[in-house]
Every structure is written in C-alpha cells, then in structure tokens.
Image (cartoon, coloured by chain):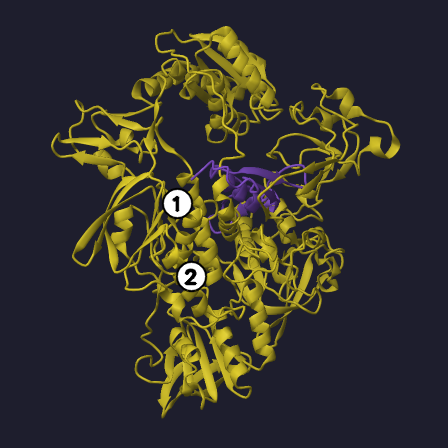
Chain colours: A purple, B yellow
Amino acid sequence: MEKKDDSKELEGAVAVIGGGIAGMQTALDLANSGYYVYLVEKTAGIGGVMAQLDKTFPTNDCSM
Amino acid sequence: MTVTQHPRFVDLDRCIACGTCAEKCPKKANDSYNENLVKRKAIYVPYSQTVPLKYAIDPENCIYFAKGKCKACEKFCPAGAINFNDAEKEITLQVGSIILAPGFKSFDPSSYDTYSYTNLPNVVTAIEFERILSATGPFMGHLVRPSDNKEPNKIAWFQCIGSRDINLCDHGYCSSVCCMYAIKQTLIAKEHSGIPIDCAVFYMDMRTHGKDFDRYYENAQKSGVRFIRSRIHSLSQIAGTDDLLVRYATEDGTLEQEIFDMVVLSTGLEIDKSIIELAARLGIKLDNDNFSLTDTFHPVATSVPGIYACGAFSGPKDIPSSVTEASAAACAATEHLAPVRFTRTKSLDLPPEKDVTREAPRIGVFVCNCGINIGGVIKVPEVVEYARTLPNVAYVEENLFTCSQDTQEKITEVIKDKGLNRVVVAACSPRTHESLFQETLINAGLNKYLVEMANIRNQDSWVHSEDPDAATEKAKDLVRMAVAKTALLTPLRETDLNNIRSALVLGGGVAGMTAALSLARHGYPVHLVEKSEALGGNALRLYKTHKGEAVASYVQGLVRAVESEKLITVHLDSIVTNVDGFVGNFKTDLSHGSSREVIEHGVAILAVGAKEYEPKEYLYGEHDAVMTHLELDYLFLHNDTRLDGVKNVAFIQCVGSRNQENPYCSKVCCSHSLVSALELKRRKKDINVYIFYRDIRTYGKREILYREAREKGVLFFRYSLDEKPVVSPNGDRVQIVFRDPVLDRRLAVNADILCLATAIISHRDQSLAQLFKVPLDMDGWLLEAHQKLRPVDFPNDGIFLCGMAHYPKPIDESIAQAKAAASRALTILAKEKIKVGGIVSRIVPELCSGCFGCVNVCPYGAITFDYDKQIAVVNEALCKGCGACAATCPSEAVILMGFDKEELYAQITSALSA
C-alpha cells in the first residue's frame, strides 16, 4: 500500500507549527510513521513552556 | 506554505556552544526563560538543555545592531560561527497537511490592581514561582522570596487569576491546570525549603479531575497544606516590612485576614496575540476565548480542512492531554496521506559493519569538557593523560563537547584512521546520549554496542563541584572502569522479524470504533472485537455533549462507517481467550459462542470502556423519582412524557465518586448535570433545578455551562462528605434535606426527579489484564507506561489503550485518545520488520537449574519455562534488557548481553584496584 505514485498531488510531508511538548510529540509520531516533518518554532530552541517547569504533576518528575 | 525564518546570526553548523561569546558579550538582557527574574546576555542559549544547543543573537539587545560596533562575540568565537550578515529568509514548504501546536501564554496579571503584582516583589506568578523552585532558576533552586532573599515561612496561592472571571480579564473559561499545579507547587515548596513552611491555597472549587489527581490533592491535605474556600478581598504590604496582608471572605461571608511572606498568583492560560494573528492568516476560526474552534467529534480538526490543532491552542489542558492530542493530530493529519507514506522520507546509506571479533582491543577514549560543566571542576587534561596509560587504549582525545555534530564527524574519522575497534566516551549519561554515540559507531562501520560511557558529569563534576581534586580522581576511576569493561565488549546482533501489519482493537464503543477507523483509513486491516451483540457502547445512551451536539446520532453514523469499511472485520459477541506472541507477531484466540478463531496481528488497542456505578444510596432502586444520568438521558432522548409534569429536579453530585470505595473524580458528572439542568430549563423555563455538589468541576471551556446555569437560575448547594444530603420518600416525590453552608442552616426541597450523578467505574477485568500482560491501577483503570509522556502506551511494546478503560472521560477526550492510540500503533504498523536482540538476556541451558527465579522476577513476561527441557527460555522480542533475571539467577545461567558477568567483574575489579 506504500510508495504508490498514483497520487502525485499529495505530499508525504507535514508542517508542525510550535516546538513545545505537543509539537514535538506530533512531529515524532509523524516521522516514525513515515512522513517527513518540518517543525517550525519561533524561538531559538524547542521545548516550550514545559521546559520552564520545575516538576510536573501528578508524578512530580523533573520536567526536563 | 511559506515560512519566514528570522536570522540567528550564529552558524548552527559551526557553533560548538562553548559559551565564550556569552562570557565576552558586554550587554545584559532580560532572561525570558527565567521570566525576567534574572539577566542573560544578548547572545544566548534559551536554557542549558536547549535543542539545538546553539547560541543566538537577540538583535533587540545586541550593541552592534544598536550602535554599529562591538562584535565581541565574533572576535572571541573559536569556531568562527558568528555571522552578522545573516538575514531573514522566506522558505516555501510543500506539505500535505499542517498541524498547529502554538501553545499558550501565561496570563499577565499586571492589570489586576487587587493583587498589586506590579508593585509588590513578593507577589509572583505561578510560572515565576516555577523558575524560583528550579535548580536552573534565579536562586539555583533555593526557595527564597525575591524582595530580600529571605526563606519564606508562609506562602499563599490565589487560584483563578485570569480564569473564571469575565469582569476583569474577559476569560470566562477555567484554565484546567492551575488547581493541580498549585498543589504541586505547595508540595515542592515544602520539599525544597530549608525550614518548615505553611502553604495555603485560596480557591473557589478544587478541580482535580484527572487520573490520580484527587489522590494528589488528598496527600497535600494530609501533609498539612491548607485549602481555604474563599474569595480574596484585598492584598497589601505591611508598612515597614516586605510581608503581605491577605484579606479574604470565607464561604459564609466572614471577612478574615492573615499575613504571608509571599503570594503566588495561579495564573491561567490564554492565547497569545501573535497566535490570533496566525489563525487569521490561515483562516482558522477561533472561539470567543480565542481558542481554536473544534467540535466534540473532531477534537483535533480546525475549521480549515487539512489544518489540525493540538495542545493548549484548542482549549486549556494539561501535559498528558496535550501529548495525547499531539499523537491524535499526527494520526488525523495523515489519514488522507496514507498513499504517500514514505515518499518524502530519506533512508540512510550506512557503511558495512567491520568484523572486530578477532582483533585485539584498540580503545579510543573521548573525554568531554561539556563546556564548563565538567571542565570547570574536573582537570580534564589530567584525565586524558591518565587514560593514555591504561591497557588497550590506543587513542585519547579531549573535546569541548563530545556530543557536538562536528565531534561526531571527527570521531568517525579517528576510528577509521587509528583503526579503533572500541570506544569509551567519558561525558554524561547513557540515558540521554548513548544512542548518539552508537550512531557515530555505525557511521564508522563498527557494531553500535562497542561503545561505553563513563558518566563524569552527573555522577562526578555535578555532585563533587566543591572538591575538584577528588572529582578528578573519581573521573580517572570511572574512565579506568569503563576501559576495563570495554576491552571485553563483543558485538551484539539484532535480527529482523516479520511484522504482521494489522491490528486488533478490543471494544466496540466510540473509542474502539474511532481507533479502528483511523487505522483502516491509514490502510491497515483491523479486527474489531466487541463482547456484546452490537457496536456503540455507552455513548449510544447519551443525549448531548457539553457543546450541545447530539451524541446518539453521531455514534450511529460511526457504527455505519465501521460496518461499511472493507478493512475492518467486526467480531460481535466475541471475547479474547488467549494471547500469544509479542509486538509484530501476536496470535489472539477469539471465542464466539462455541466457535473459535485465531487472529494474527502486529498491534493491539485496548478500548474496553467502563460502566456506570449502580448506586446503593439515596433510595436508588427503591423510589421511581430517583435515577442516574443515563436514565435521565433516556427520558430526554425519547421525549418521555414523564418530563411533562415535572416542577422540581435535583441532582446530587459525586455519588460513588471521591469516596473511600472510589477515591477518584469521575470527571464527566459535573458537566453532565449542568447539561441536563440547562436542557430542563430550555424545555421549561419555570422548572426549579437544585444541584448538590462538593466542588463544581466544569474544567476548561465547560465552565461556560456553570455560568449559564447560574444565570438561568439553577441553584447550587455545596455539601461535605461528613454531612451528605438525606433523601426520604414523599409520595411520588422525594424530599432532600441538606445544610446550606452559606446560610449555615438546614433546608429541605422536594423533587419530582432526583438525578444521581453516579461514578464511572472500571470493569476490573483482571483476566484481560493478564492476557495482555498489562497493569491495572488501584482503581481498576488500565495503567499507561508514563502518565505524561506515554499516555496511551503500555510498558510492553505493541499494545495501546484508549477511552474510559484508562479513566472516566468525555467523548472529545475519548476520541482524541483513540486517534492517539492509532497514531502510536501506526509507528509500528509502518515498519516492514521488527528488530529484536541487542541488549537482551540469554540463558545458558547447561547452567539453568529450573528454579523459576527469573520467570517470576521478569516484569515483561519475557521468560517462559520449557517443561520438556526443564529450563527457562527468554523471548528476545519481549525482553527489555533490564537485567532483573541476571541479578536473580543463583546459577549465573543468565547472561545479559552487553553486561555479562566477565564485563561487570572486570569493571568491579578495576574499581577496587586503585
């Protein structure tokens, strides 16, 4: 079912806007299921708000 | 689509993140990562673990951009990475779909005079408090207040700042996460503080509606955190001190006051202006609160086909829900792209692997400075010289960052030039970096298991920063031990197994059907197994969603879609009786009446749902006026004449939830009661509706229901567990006697219908859990691999979960979770082969005494017992290489590959030889 070329108008790539925890997870799933991903982030690094948090509930593990 | 890339002024390929530029940069700027509580330089990395770990110049603050001279960074950069001519670029991308995950912004409370956030330094926002608590924050994780660096004795949290408030901030919604993060902050503050501290949370309703959240709340209460149901009257600084006077009104209207050292504002989530503009450019419709407009049945779709949304952009939500939606969006966004899967991806061209088994060990040692992380404490040149004296070491090198891209290329060359056949990296943790160095070995034509890491950072320079000499000696010990083990490393093999590219979905409710349809649309065959005689599940009995959409008709449509999908085989009246195999190769026995069938599949999704609790209290089953939500929905669905004569309707919340038996919140019942209350009011304006509750938990956008219900005259009375309402028969009606906490009086109402907002409980299907070897938690819910980061996975590969079997949840969340489970399953189905082997256990048959020790200790069910041969056997596909079996075996019959006993003994002998 893969690598068909009968759908030339379709692109096997996805753009993800935002490199926080949601953007990163969606990008990983896409890449691992066979799609090229463009991850677009407006700041100088990915991580988003979660990277600012110390610990996270309810497991209290380190956010990093 | 077109993307504008702003200039970074630093060449990503050249920057080695040594930090010299920031050291030399003369210009300080606000550090937004630390919420401007400290300064950074105009050339910076956002935070120490940033990906990519590369510097960037902030042109707003850079002196060169303001005055035309400086360029100190350029002068001192050892890598020539600074490029002041870097310019904005327009990039055109050809994509099949777009996923928006732009996130949220923490509400800025500057506009609130009441809380004097801008004037009083000891009034901080929750995100500022996160930074204060953090080891990488302004106070290195020491809990002190900003005004005078004093350790606070008393801290107050104010809830709902910028949430549930249409007067001052125009945010009518609940931000969903603040109750939980405030509780977390109280607990972490207590843990971090050098002195015992008093934490008080001032709140309206505690909304701890997620999995394990209520337990978390109860633990905080037990550890002495005070929760004060109140409204804040005012906040002021006590003259001559930095202390804060909090005045507040309790539930019965009494005005109280208390002094605190610090106040944390539990600020809500909102959508940033730039995101609103982005949505406008893309033509995406937003709701009244500027969140992406979604409907219940398409939770990750936007108003524009081909554009999807996930995370806080579509409504305030916590990390587990954001991660779930992220996976869901990946699935939804590619349903139409299944025919072009793998057309844009690239495959790696790898060199052939060199056979080193007959060669004498030639070890290369790479010692990392990690910027100043290691080099600032440990005398790295001394460690390098020491490493040269060790046996089998053929080459030693010092790196500023062993992990940087250019170093990887260098290592690859060195391995080839010097004929190295094993590598030791003395740097950080294999947990984060081993895979990187394994890849480097592959690129150099070596087996990836011939690398060993010595953790001289986390386990040395970080913990012994006070004693550089001892840290240097320890680094030498760690390197010597690693070298001793490495000399014995042997190449490990991975083999490819066939992957059966089809799925088994268990449970034919909304979650199961959604997951099955998603997988089928991605082109993979699905067996959908339902134990009852029809598809549909609980949702068929629901009337409306919180957004007013009819549920039953949607579910009927879903059933038709599943039935007409060629790739889905539906098995009704069927149960699973046996499961064999592992990821990529499951064999599951189904029984349907007297007939049996064996299904072969590569992945499984468990969507077995949950059920309504059958109340034993409040005259349920004894009096006709008393019913559950599903029974009231039945009356609505059928426009039952019983509703015609009704004048008074009462709802009692938390029936069977948040008690000793079921110490969790069932999440959906508050919203369900309000939907029903509003439906009653819509049908008949003068109907009286009374709701008896403990906390109203209309989280997120559901808060709109609560506001509307109060506007329409629904009356709310709070009760506590020690004084529940008392229900007694009164002819056709029932009488409810209760204490009103506002008036502090006992009151009574008569109700024609008393709807019990009953708990949702687990089927507690232990046999299912055993068949699939998946865990159930204390409340009977399927327990995921990690609540935040792997919310729909299990610890064992190839099995996923979704829907109410995980925890009670509304339909939109079940659908998102189902698509997420499908997405995770797709990451396996997309592979042609399953790789097994590497670091796994093997059992030497001659040494096995058949004691069953390993069989019992294996947490993954990877070891079985061969009764014919009377020995234990490891299934490599299930083994995770944890080594529990090797540690348990009394006969040393178990070999954990890559950690065999000779290797470990060599390491230990080396440790003791110093």
Q: Position of residue B619 (x, y in %)?
A: 33, 81
At which x and y percent is residue B714? 54, 80
- The earlier-in-sequence mark between 1 and 2 is 1
Q: Which residue is mark 2?
A: B558
Label 1 crowd bin: few (<14), some (14–19), many (20+), radius 10 Å:
many
Secondary structure beneath dot 2 equals: helix
How far is mark 1 from mark 2, CA to CA?
A: 18 Å
Q: Is residue B476 above or below residue A7?
A: above
Please give the chain letter of the residue carrying mark 1. B
Which one is nearer the viewer's eye here, B389 or B829? B829
| 10 Å crowding of disc 2: few (<14), some (14-19), many (20+) | some
Q: Is residue B370 left or right of residue B731?
A: right
**Residue B614 shows in this picture:** yes
Q: Nearer the viewer, residue B346 or B258?
A: B346
Residue drawn at 61 percent across, 55 percent down: B304
Chain to which mark 2 belongs: B
* Amino acid at dot 2: Leu
Q: Position of residue B225 (x, y in %)?
A: 52, 58
Residue underneath mark 1: B524
Q: Split into 4 quadrants, where in the image is the C terminus of chain B?
A: top left
